[in-house]
Image (spheres, coloured by chain):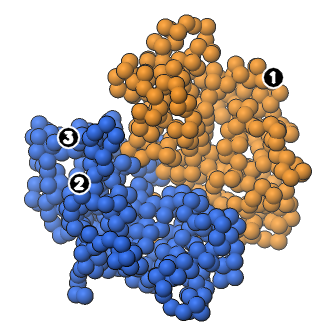
Chain colours: A blue, B orange
Amino acid sequence: MNEMSPILEVTNLKVHFPVSGGGTVHAVDDVSFSIKKGVAFGLVGESGSGKTTTALGCVKLVDSIAGQIKLEGNDITNLQGEALRQARRNMQIVFQDPYASLNPRERVGSIVKRPLNLMNIGTTEEREKRVAELFETVGLRPEQRDLFPHQFSGGQRQRIGIARALATQPKLIVCDEPVSALDVAIQAQILNLLVRLKKEFDLTYLFISHDLAVVQHICDEIAVMYLGQIVERGSKREIFNNPRHPYTKALISAVPSAGSIGKPKTDRITLQGDPPSPISPPDGCRFASRCPYAQSACRVKMPSLKTVGGSHTVACLRVDQDGNFI
Amino acid sequence: MSTPLLSVQNLDVAFQIEGSEVPIIRDLSFEVSYNEVLGIVGESGCGKSMTALALMGLVPNPPGRITNGSILFEGRDLAKVSEPQMQSIRGNEISMVFQEPMTSLNPVYTVGEQIAETARAHFNIGRAEAKDRAVEMLKLVGIPSPERRFDDYPHQMSGGMRQRVMIAISLICEPKLLIADEPTTALDVTVQAQIFDLFKELQEKIKTSIILITHDIGVVAEMTDRVMVMYAGRKIEEGPVADFIQNPRHPYTKGLISCIPTLQENPPEIPVPLFEIPGVVPSASELSRPGCAFAPRCSQKMDRCANLFPQTVELATGRIVSCWLEMEENA
């Protein structure tokens, strides 16, 4: 493997779902991005924007109808059967709901050991040792292995989910809203754990969240999605210090902040209405119907992502090559 | 000072759990003035929602009941009124918006019928007039083409739309007090911004007082006038919103504010570790223990914290803290 080749490289990924009575849900349309080793890549957007479907497409849990997915340079787009199962060793998921994602009738030690058994990693003793080690890594006591999931709190369960995801030493970990089901005080514990693990083991995250503050805290690079497409992509600084797409600006300005006591922010861009239906998305810019800056051209021509400096790309007809608003 | 709209005094709510009576809300006193927004914050399991249910007369009985105290709403004690009386108050004068817009609406009736039903239950009006009022209300909460959406079923609407319908139902009788229990937790930020704009607008228009239950400090800052912090069924701190955010006194409040990542204009490349409140909220069975319930998680606990709940210290008018540290400093 080339030192510089990214862990995950997604090109023109499309995921469509048929709906009863004809028609197609355009869940993900032409999404491209790559994630380098040791980077936390965040996908943000409103519900229904295709964040989770994109991530599931990347790890082959839903089928794409077009595009290419490369994991460490190897094309996994069309893997099936045993070859796909073996590839799963390198891509693991931390799920949103720590109550639904652990088998209630299985002891948690066995839950964490299961990936090792399935992938046939190490001897029985080595597996036991690894599980004990994983428990310590995520801040649980090894002797808690014999308990059942219901004997743990939400935060502890999420730690178990993280230990399970780490078990096979995957190249890529997908974190799908890993803290949104947790209580506020517990969120901090899990976020700190994810940051520490990333540093300690040089982990690579594909991180999905609707909470911009959480994404800003944990992610190095960010892609903003709207109705199945990436509308802006860049480093944490590029996205938060200098957002260019009107949707990104609206999203950031909508977050209530502790600094604005007693009054909403004056520069808030309030979006009207809801996103259009993904069953028949508009031909032009998909955001045009809610965009305060849309012109007639926006409703006809679909903007493509263009670079506006560094790693910062934007898909908006009203932003020029230098990132200026025209 | 004029009489407040709502005055809760020494409220106790207890639940029968496995044969013993467990105090879920203890010695809770607070007031809500006319046209005021009071925020209630705390982790889940701290008694926020149970407080709301107590005000609505909806504490599930059995196993729960109000064991002590009074809830004075414009002079009437809601803890003592009969169920038929409560029914005429509920929805009419106090109404509530729940957290989950999907499960709070009936899936087999159109949203219009559900709004009109509320109007007909509380006013002596016919179907046609109820429908007119419902359409009007749908328009007020910002639902486009309300005449057409009147006939939609809940599943045909997005989460934001459904929450607007819930708000329409709760406001159609122009209540004096609206209790909103995490009304935007299930919604996207852009929709949340719309809902809060709507709250502000309605508050101006119909002078409703609001109790806003939330754990989002940003929301508290933007929406509320005063804040009450609850832990393990007790009020541990109360004060104007600016004091709450800029000068929190109780270790729990301090932790709650600093453990949440906030959106920054110039984020650091490498994340600064967040403050962690260790442990979890006590379970119901641990609530009967003496002392300060927060002590096991508190970094500044002293010997006496384990045995005795601290008295309430009033630092200034309406600025209240219950912590031994305060008593120490003021001694």
Q: Residues within 10 Å of mark 2 (few under 14, many from 20)?
A: many
Is B309 drawn above or below residue A251 in the view shown? below
* Residue A226 at x, y percent in the picture: 28, 50
Q: Are marks 1 and 2 in contact (CB under 8 Å)?
A: no
* Residue A31 at x, y percent in the picture: 23, 60
Q: Are marks 2 and 3 in contact (CB under 8 Å)?
A: no
Of marks 1 and 3, the one in the foreground: 3
Chain letter behind tag 2? A
Q: Residue at x 75, y 66 (%)?
A: B295
Is A89 drawn above or below residue B248 in the view shown? below
Question: In the rendered image, which quarter is residue B36 located in?
Answer: top right
Q: Are marks 1 and 3 in contact (CB under 8 Å)?
A: no
Q: Amino acid at mark 3?
A: Pro
Chain letter behind tag 3? A
Observer-nearest of A129 and A115:
A115
Q: Residue at x 48, y 64 (%)?
A: A95
Q: Which mark is residue A122?
A: none
Residue assigned mark 3? A282
The mark that comes first in sequence, 2 or 3, is 2
Cα–Cα gap, marks 1 and 3: 56 Å
Counting labels gives 3
Query: Which image quarter holds the N terminus of chain A?
Result: bottom left
Residue assigned mark 1? B82
Q: Amino acid at mark 2?
A: Asp
Label 2: which secondary element: strand
In the shown orientation, is residue A100 left or right of residue A287?
right
Observer-nearest of A184 and A89:
A89
Q: Residues within 10 Å of mark 1 (few under 14, many from 20)?
A: few
Residue assigned mark 2? A29
Observer-nearest of B224 and B249:
B224
Q: Residue furthest front?
A: A81
